[in-house]
Image (cartoon, rainbow, N blue to C red):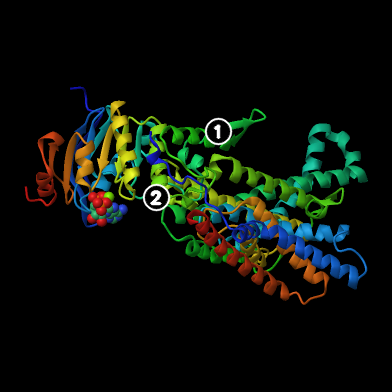
Amino acid sequence: MDDTYKQDKATPQLSESTRLLLIITKAWSWVFLALILVFFEVWSQIEVGRSFLWSTYNLQSLGVAAVQILMLALGLTLVIVASHIDLSIGFITGLAAVMAAVLIRLLDPFTNDLYLIALDMTLGAAAEPLKTMFLGDLLGVTVGQSVSVVIAIAGAAAIAMVPGLINGWMVSKLKVPSFIGTLGMYGIARGVALLIAGGATVSIQNDVARDWGNGTHFEVPYIVVFAILCAVAFHYLLSSTRFGVYTYAIGGNYQAAVRAGVRVDRHLIILFMLSALTAGFGGIIYTMRFSAGAAQAGEPILLYAVAAVFIGGASLTGGKGTVVGTVIGALIIAVIQFGLVFINVAPYWQFVAVGGVIIIAVLIDQSRSTIDRLRSTS
Amino acid sequence: MTEPILSARGVSKRFGGVQALKDVSFDLYPGEVLALAGDNGAGKSTLIKAISGVHHPEEGSITFDGRDLSGLLPGAVRDLGIETIYQDLALADNLDVGLNLFLGREIVRHLLGFLPVLDRTKMRTESAAILQNLGIRVPDPTLPVGNLSGGQRQAIAISRAIYWNARLLIMDEPTAALGVPEQRLVRDLIIRLRERQVAIIYISHNLNDIFAVSDRILVLERGRKAGERKASETDDNEVVKLMMGSA
Ligand SMILES: Nc1ncnc2c1ncn2[C@@H]1O[C@H](COP(=O)(O)OP(=O)(O)OP(=O)(O)O)[C@@H](O)[C@H]1O
Ligand SMILES: [Mg+2]
């Protein structure tokens, strides 16, 4: 081959200012998170005379707020990378919350007796004295309640995935735009959740559920540990597997994915089911935290979850976004949410602040595309 | 002569009211370059998409190496050794060169012996090697391909087909968006591949190109096969007449 074929002898040179801008657009969410943390820390030191961050209670509250956002945002990240949107997750969260509560209520009377039945079967008549012993009784109730909680989690998660399956099927096979299709599912899931709950909150009295939802290990809430595990799994899936590459490829160029042999329909269905699954987990966590399931459990979080994904670097045109970015986005919103309460600002300001951050995120995404163009033409 | 590697028989395809292909039959032999000519909308792209599994014709059959292709999905067709370069390139602009070259066939290594993870480094070095081998320079292989020039993107699409050892290479207007040196590069590539007994279907609107590389020319006119000629036994005038449906 001779040299006439060689192109672009030199890599494009960027001016100093473009390079600086590039770094800012890439890292702004980290910087922003650091800035608001500094702001609340300074405010707290001056006004209250103690630390904002150096407080177990504050950190736990921040973590829990971030968990509720992140559970909706994790699955949504994959959907948005594939250049779709899932608006139904807010009420899939509600549906799962109600289902978990209803299932626990249904199962508790049966599982409470499990221990007694098991004693009878193994020990026969010798079991009688054990049944009345306080310790045995306590243990029995715990075992029974754990059984209902585990079954309820599995059941509610499975039911949450049904609307996800339908979303994926509408979007892939029927070619319904995801914005419209999932908006329809938003209404359906909401109605069904309210119907099942009878229009009210469904309360439960299950100590195991309450403990899992509120307990801590070395001061770290269980649900935070669970959310971290989910985030690691999704990060692995999106960044290091074929499934992840195909998600980016579908978002970047749907036809390219089809022609490369990616089974795009099946892929989209799985994406929407994953989105519904993490939203469902969010609902189950809600029920365990408050010992009650409500159809509205995810309603205010939908906006926050969408915001977290976009703050994390995703783009409406698809093909972009990372799980790490989404985690940062969720943390930013949790800090704003909790911080504003902490400094006694009327809670409605949260919506204003989060809305503002979303717009900043979109503006930064826009300037990033401009810079990319500069990079390739300069 | 040897057996044809690809045979199409009576292929028809409609899109709603448009009869994009009507009863098209042809054969293609290993090491042969078949040019598809025809006006805009004549059905050239539709014909090659019927081969590559993107479209499924209502009538007729296509066999490759004795295997019936009907009902196969694009991935399965590629696995048989048919690579296609599309008119509207099939690159994912948000992915880098390596991932595009390996899209659908990623290299995976196992972390700690069991956890599958993408081997991005290997895909990058492999693709850098093949690009260099073809004399194509890309400024930064870690950049999303959306940032590359039209010629560079075309080159990546072609090297993808070559890397996977296609036995049939289909190219839909591969030179349309290219500058003169890149056009020469593509032409050289076609000739080199033909020497390696790769069968090639080549779509172009440029009759000079067609006569420069092809052995046979198949002309489509509004979905019908208007004629088929050996390149050595015809000329511009006849081909243009066939394209206009007036021969
Ligand atoms: N997916 C589709 N849906 C509907 N109609 C289509 C589709 N693809 C092609 N057609 C129609 O089929 C006919 C043949 O199109 P095709 O793309 O095969 O033409 P072509 O010969 O490749 O033209 P060009 O030289 O402009 O690329 C045209 O009338 C086109 O409008
Ligand atoms: Mg065409």
User: Could you confirm whether marks 1 and 2 are on the same chain?
Assistant: yes
Residue B234 picture location, percent across and down:
10, 39
In the picture, the disc for residue B150 is 2
The Cα atoms of the two marked residues, 1 and 2, are separated by 25 Å
Secondary structure type for disc 2? helix
State the residue in front, B61 or A257: A257
> Within 10 Å of the Cα at label 2, are there few (<14), some (14-19), or many (20+) other Cα atoms?
some
State the residue in front, A292 or A277: A277
* Residue A111 seen from this side: yes
| Foreground disc of the pair 1, 2 | 2
Query: Which amino acid, by three-letter code, is at mark 2?
Result: Gly
* Residue under label 1: B122
Query: Which amino acid, by three-letter code, is at mark 1?
Result: Lys
* Residue B71 seen from this side: no
- Kindly identify the residue that appears in the image at 23 percent across and 36 percent down: B213
Q: Quadrant of residue A335?
A: bottom right
> Within 10 Å of the Cα at label 1, are there few (<14), some (14-19), or many (20+) other Cα atoms?
some
